Amino acid sequence: MSKLIDFYFDFISPYSYLAHKKIINLDKRNIFNYKAVLLGGLHNLGGITAPAFNERKMKNMMNDCVLIAKKNNIPFKWNEKFPINSLNLMRGFLLISDNQKNRYFDACFNAYWQNNIDISKDENVKKILTDCKISYDFFSSGCKDQNIKEKLKKLTNDAFNKDIFGAPTFVINDKIFWGQDRLDYALDEYNL
Amino acid sequence: MSKLIDFYFDFISPYSYLAHKKIINLDKRNIFNYKAVLLGGLHNLGGITAPAFNERKMKNMMNDCVLIAKKNNIPFKWNEKFPINSLNLMRGFLLISDNQKNRYFDACFNAYWQNNIDISKDENVKKILTDCKISYDFFSSGCKDQNIKEKLKKLTNDAFNKDIFGAPTFVINDKIFWGQDRLDYALDEYNL
């Protein structure tokens, strides 16, 4: 199996969504390996205040994402319910089988960053799961499972211990590229 | 006189240097209007912790700047004396005459981000001034002048009141573009 680019993401992150859509537009999804992290947890570990919690940075981020989306022909709408707690959706990603992951990944990102849906609401999660042919009961009980809780915590800690502090982050050949602006750099490294 | 793109900068900012060199490489210097701000002051006003003061962000920034420089054919060396206090050099920019500004701008940025010179040291400031044909006595006494002190403070406050929170920031048609990654976007807006 050839090497892949690790793509650290959280559904809460608009820049992760934009990076994902750039990857789709480049038809390069197959060379990325999704790595779930809890962005809030990563920020806490790193002593970082997210842009969402700084008035000017938040305002800039909202505008910036719209500009990036426009320049890259990506459908995008700033979600009115930002930020939300993405914990269960991120746990869910770890819970489902590998062949469900791509569809779930798209469904969560599109719901939140394209269709302005509050994905912290149970009724909306149910719709996503139905669309992905995932059982709500399986999902719901799985998210409360201690192993899954620990797994997401461990993945977030592992990322932190590799010097990762934000999302999206790309890692290839032990080199770290932070931000959707560095997707090209990660691809350059991949193509070396 | 045609419109210009305001370019908010501080010599302490490696990304401002990289943006400047991109502009030089594009031969577009004539459409930018340099706006001095004290980046540390701007961060304080905005309640922002600079990447320099976060271990992982600092490490990433050092690596990131080298990558950007390489990709854009920009000579660059991370300064061993980072961060320093850029206060006097920024005040100096306000003090000197308009026809000296371009040369001084280049000399300060090149010394710090190309030649690894500690520009907080008096002997090195003297060399820069000699190179720019600026009298050291004029510069030195001017930097202590209350009007100049107030002027830099006012420019920083004015920037903050326009929602600016970092450097480089570009402003054109009342639109704000933060970071060297958004230089292209500012140029797009300019060319509308």
Image (cartoon, coloured by chain):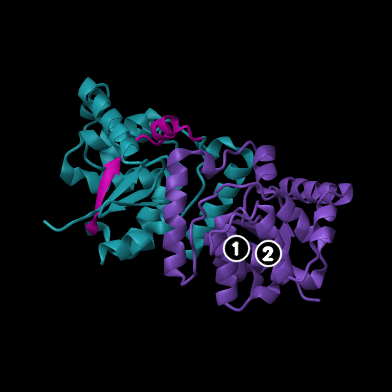
Chain colours: A purple, B cyan
- Residue type pointed to by label 1: Ala
Q: Mark 1, chain letter?
A: A
Mark 1: give few (<14), some (14-19) or many (20+) Cα within 10 Å.
some
Instruction: Assign the C terminus of chain B to one quadrant of the image.
Output: bottom left
Q: Earlier in the sequence, mark 1 or mark 2?
A: 1
Toward which corner of the image does residue A105 lie, by quadrant?
Answer: bottom right
Residue drawn at (84%, 60%), measured in percent from left and top?
A138
Quote the CA–CA distance across marks 1 and 2.
Answer: 10 Å
Magenta segment: B31-48
Q: Is residue A49 above or below residue B4?
A: above
Q: Are marks 1 and 2 in contact (CB under 8 Å)?
A: yes
| Same chain letter for marks 1 and 2 | yes
Side of B129 where B167 appears, left or right: right
> Is A39 or B69 nearer to us in this picture?
A39
Q: Position of residue A182 (x, y in %)?
A: 55, 61
Residue highlighted by disc 1: A111
Residue highlighted by disc 2: A127
Q: Is residue B43 magenta?
A: yes
Toward which corner of the image does residue B41 lie, by quadrant?
Answer: top left
* Secondary structure of the residue carrying numbered label 2: helix
Q: How many marks?
A: 2
Q: Is residue A168 above or below residue A24?
A: above
Side of B150 where A95 appears, left or right: right
Q: Position of residue B9 (x, y in %)?
A: 35, 44
> Is A87 or B5 nearer to us in this picture?
A87
Can the viewer see residue A182 in this picture? no
The label number, if any, that marks residue A160 in the structure image: none
Residue drawn at (88%, 50%), measured in percent from left and top?
A147
